[in-house]
Image: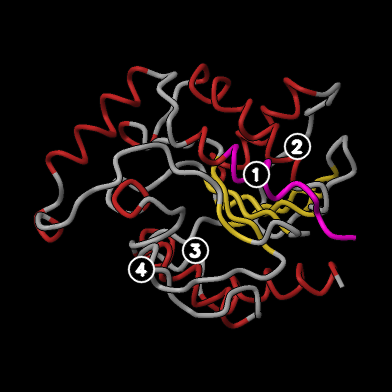
Amino acid sequence: MKNNNKKSLIALNSKITKCKSCSRLVKFRTKIATEKRKMYLKESYWGKPVSGFGDYNAKLMIIGLAPAAHGGNRTGRVFTGDKSSDFLFECLGKVGLSNQSYSINKKDNLKLKNAYLTLSLKCVPPGDKPTKQELINCSNYLRKELILLNRVKIIIALGKIAFDSIILFYKNNYEYNTRGVKFIHGDSTKLPDEKTLVSCYHPSPRNVNTGRINMQKFTKLFSDTTKSLS
């Protein structure tokens, strides 16, 4: 059955991009968009909250922590325009979740199949470290995303902080006993609403360069997950 909530998701995403709830984040995202990185000086930065993107009928949700300062905060689309997105989309292209193996800007004709990308925190935080209150403020958007994306069966959390933010969300919104729940790459955790949370190392340059994650490991996790959705 098709998801009938497309219009509601579009409206939610529009609302997200207008959010000014967290003054610290508003100040920082604006600062980054004004100062810019030298190689992007001629570009107009997005400098606003970054909403989710993908297939509205997705069974798979892929979630990161927050927009990259010169990635999503610059391009206005989640996992777009930085090294992490290069790695991620090479993988998504290989396993058939994306129509192409790159994510450069909003006009690159990218489409996702059976997958929806989103973030626990919609704005870039200083030092990539959000406060607990900022995550709580933003969790209302995540809750609405999970309600409207009513076909999602599996959530892949990219990185421990994103994983922890999802655990915090379910702890605050459900009677969820989190004792013993740990981030271990490739492991799965059953959530109280019957979804499955899969732990995955973040495709950051640091993790790739140190060998913590490589394309073979990353692709295998996504390939195995995709097969389980069939």
Label 3, label 4: how far apart the Cα atoms are? 25 Å
Residue at mark 1:
9
Label 1, label 2: how far apart the Cα atoms are? 30 Å
Callout 1–callout 4 Cβ contact below 8 Å: no
120 with respect to 103 (left or right): right
Give the residue type at disc 1: Leu
Give the residue type at disc 3: Arg
Query: Disc 2 on helix, strand or loop?
Result: loop
Pick whichever of labels 3 and 4 is earlier in the sequence.
4
Q: Position of residue 109 (x, y in %)?
A: 46, 74
31 with respect to 107 (left or right): left
Please provide the residue range marked out in magenta: 1-12
Identity of the residue drawn at 75% across and 42% down: 148
Callout 3–callout 1 Cβ contact below 8 Å: no
Residue at mark 4:
104
Q: Residues within 10 Å of mark 2 (few under 14, many from 20)?
A: few
Label 3, label 1: how far apart the Cα atoms are? 35 Å
Label 3, label 2: how far apart the Cα atoms are? 21 Å
Residue 227 colored in magenta in the image: no
Task: Establish if 157 lies above or below 110.
Answer: above
Residue at mark 3:
212
Q: Residues within 10 Å of mark 4 (few under 14, many from 20)?
A: some
Q: How many marks?
A: 4
